[in-house]
Amino acid sequence: MVTVSQVTPRAGRWTELALLVPALAVGIYAYLQVGLAVNGAVPPDLLAFGLVTAAIALAVHVVLRLRAPYADQVLLPIVVALNGLGLAMIERVHLALQARENVPSWDVDPTRQMMWMAVGATACLAVLLLLRDHRTLRRYTWTFLAAGLFLLLLPLAPVIGKEINGSRLWIGVGPLSLQPAELAKICFAIFFAGYLVTHRDTLTLAGRKVLGMTFPRVRDLGPILFAWAISVGVLLFQRELGTSILLFGLFIAMLYVATERLSWVLIGGVLTIGGVLLLASRIGYIQARIDVWLHALDPDIYSRNPGGSGQIVSGLFGMASGGLMGTGWGEGYPQLTYSANADMIVPSLGEELGLTGLLAVLMLYLVFAQRGMRTAIGVRDGFGKLLGCGLAFIVALQCFVVVGGATRVIPLSGLTMPFLAAGGSSLLANWMILALLLRLSDGARRPGPEVEPALPRDPREPRASVAGAAG
Amino acid sequence: MNAALRRVSAVVIAMFLVLMAAVTSVQFFQASSLNGDPRNVRNTYRENGRDRGPIVVAGAEIAFSQPVDDPYKFLRTYTQGPLYAPVTGYSSVVFGQSGIELAENSVLNGTSPSLWQQRLGDLVTGRQPQGGAVELTIDPAVQQAAYDALGDHEGAVVALDPRTGEVLALVSTPGFDPNVLAGHDTAAVNAAWQQLLNDPGKPLANRAIAGDTYAPGSTFKLIDVAAALSADAALTPDTRISAPDSITLPGSTATIANPAGERCDDGETATLATAFAKSCNTPFVQMALDLGADAIRDQADAFGFGDQLAIPLTVTPSRLGPIADEAALGQTAIGQRDVRVTPLQMAMVSSAIANDGVLMRPYLVATTRDANLTVVSKTSPSELSTPITPEVAATMTQLMEGVVTSGTGRRAQISGVQVAGKTGTAESGFDDGTARSNPHAWFTGFAPADDPQVAVAVLVVNGADPAAGDYTGGALAAPIARSVMAAALGSGS
């Protein structure tokens, strides 16, 4: 399975620079097309748009050259391309909404989004510059748990907490609206990694065999029940299905990687189904979400107010009208769908770029997540492996929840598409995920004197890491 | 841990495969049903939100789309709405299209296969797709003259170029302004639509080609004479034919007299020329009875009766009715009973006579062009049929000149130009059982008789008020035809 070979890995920074050219071009071309289609003129701020996105990309690139030369060379270009596409769509929806008599509250100025992109990139740079070795984070395992819980609970605080569309996910600080759960997911990923790497032996070895599967002891169920309780709490008090699924899914995935025990996935599945069944019948809003999911096109559900399926059906209509090739930038009607620049940005892209464009976007995410997983395989320490896996899985699962919600694979929730959707906290959090993955991948691919001597301390951690490093 | 990591990687791939399948399902497999959903307003927006190409008459855009700031993006605008409404029809976000807007929809909205070159260019350059232009054969001077001459009358005018079949004018009154239906305020459009539907003048009906058809009255005698001349080479304008004061229809007690009970010549016979010029009834009833129903029907069919024409507007076929017996044949001969025609059909009869017996296929669209104004299609004149020989056509021209020179159609005279024509005054309440409404006034003809450049048909619906004394087609319709022909000759020369 594993061939151990000694190859000096190329740093790959020139590859990254070359990939950044088309990545930037995609966004700038999209922005140009939006201006041409909607206003019939080259957007006056096209140059500024191009310069700012290029400056952000180059700044990260340069810092990588200096501080993480062996970092994965594909991650940054993918993020730059997705950010550019998102900005173009936000601008496109913004132009359409500005033409209305009453501009809806969900309109987002692309300048604001670009500012958040800069903030996110700055945070990314800060992480790369300050965090020289990811293992440092392990020391703060319990601090991150506290931070994660604090961030999750913040919207419930009296003054700053805000409820939007029935979900209590936001905090308002002056003019800013933040979704602390976006940052909380990183904190939990770090905590889970630190906790699980320490306790994996207990969680793995003890237990009894039932039907060929080793099940854990009851007292070892503590952590998973704790994670489940947090998720159910989010669902109950913040009324947000997406975050709840994301946190629990993240924990189960990391628990499975740590223990390699399928029984944990089974228990997780039972707890998920149990939780949904328990809550669905008791909480009207979840029941409504499920109705909308199963019977979106039903006229009664469609016209129900509140809690109708108008938003999701409008998104489906948009995607259908896009068809295979899409209407082209600025030629569709994505603005008809509520939150077409944030929660429903995927249908907007589907409408204007078509099935072809949307599949390409999904491929970008898949490559991103796979490069993250590959990084996890290549990293030499258990903590790093778990963290890399967790971060990559967060992005993948979030895509699944968002796109699956819009296409009725699962019920729709309020999560946003990483890097694409309008929303500052989401951008900030995802740029930090990028930074952590870059840092991890630099550690994974950096050739060092410790490669050969680093005999696995743990027999469960074979020398595959060497191959990972070589790849 | 790496084995588990690889499995999680596989799960991630599976998750994305599910998403890709879901997206494909929505955007490909469910697309047609979602696009067909009546709640999907995107279709309406898209159909109407295109930069629709213009409809052009003599180089001027009579219908075009102007950019506006609303979801439809473009507002269809008609520069002279009521004047051209029977031709352009309307393009409404609520009620769809009619007229040329409907017939040439694929060119105007840019989806026609003939515009593939332009679409390919748009795809490459990313330019917003634009519709093609439709250039009409209408002569604005003739159209305007016809519209003005009809005035407040309910009626229709069709003018053709007999040499090519080009439609020079197509007017129906009372009309409507397509601008009121093209608006984007759906409530206002609905209100306007209701008003048009409830209007007793039926402004949405296109009397020139479609919807109601009308009894042609004495203009149908052109078909009797054409059939008679074709059947009997010895028949000349000077041949004396039977012309009694009244004739009893075979198999019934009903009689037919000459118009207003007048004597045709000597009460026994009259020359064909006199009978035709004075539009006596009895000679033509006898003529049809002698020829038989089949001969009349064949002749009418040769002139285009019963044809499903599209010019490209759909034309209601004109018809003779069943002609069940001799009595019906007698009434058919003078354009009554079940005979129903469109003004276009009568213009086609004159057009064939004018063009040496060759009927050219009438058409409205001269060229279609792409958004760069490159011609993508051009209509070439084509023959529809040859209903009569050149000799018969020459004799009929002579007879029709007589109508205008010294007969019922004197008011169609144009100084310096020899006009040929035939009048008609059709009983319209003949078979509807209720109180009789006023007769229809007709005139059809062409000019100049020796070098025909325009053929017309004029209909004034229920316009002939018997109480008004001189109420015939000659009095009402002939002057309208004169204005139209004069306008055509004025611009043509």
Image (spheres, coloured by chain):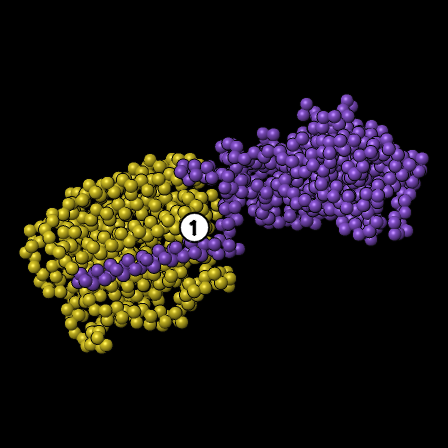
Chain colours: A yellow, B purple
Residue B243: image quadrant is top right
Relative to residue A16, is residue A263 depicted above or below?
Answer: below
Q: How many marks?
A: 1
- How far from the left and from the top, in percent, is residue B233? 80, 34
- Does residue A112 appear in this view? no
Apparent side of residue A398 relative to residue B471 in the rendered image (left or right):
left
Q: Residue at x 51, y 51 (%)?
A: B41
Along the line of sight, the residue nearer the viewer: B239 or A97: B239
- How far from the left and from the top, in percent, is residue A80? 28, 45
- The quadrant of the rendering that contains the C terminus of chain B is top right
Apparent side of residue B180 relative to residue B374 in the rendered image (left or right):
right
- Does residue A50 appear in this view? yes
User: Which residue was labeled with disc 1?
Assistant: A323
> Disc 1 marks which amino acid?
Gly
Along the line of sight, the residue nearer the viewer: A394 or A432: A394
Apparent side of residue B468 relative to residue B312 in the rendered image (left or right):
right
Chain label for disc 1? A
Q: Residue at x 19, y 66 (%)?
A: A260
Q: Residue at x 35, y 67 (%)?
A: A236
- How far from the left and from the top, in percent, is residue A185? 26, 58
Q: Dot 1 lies on which element?
A: loop
- The quadrant of the rendering that contains the N terminus of chain B is bottom left
Query: What is the crowding at mark 1: few (fewer than 14 residues within 10 Å), some, or many (at least 20)?
Result: many
Residue B488: image quadrant is top right
- How far from the left and from the top, in percent, is residue A345? 38, 51
Q: Residue at x 20, y 63 (%)?
A: B4
Along the line of sight, the residue nearer the viewer: A413 or B311: B311
Along the line of sight, the residue nearer the viewer: A311 or A78: A78
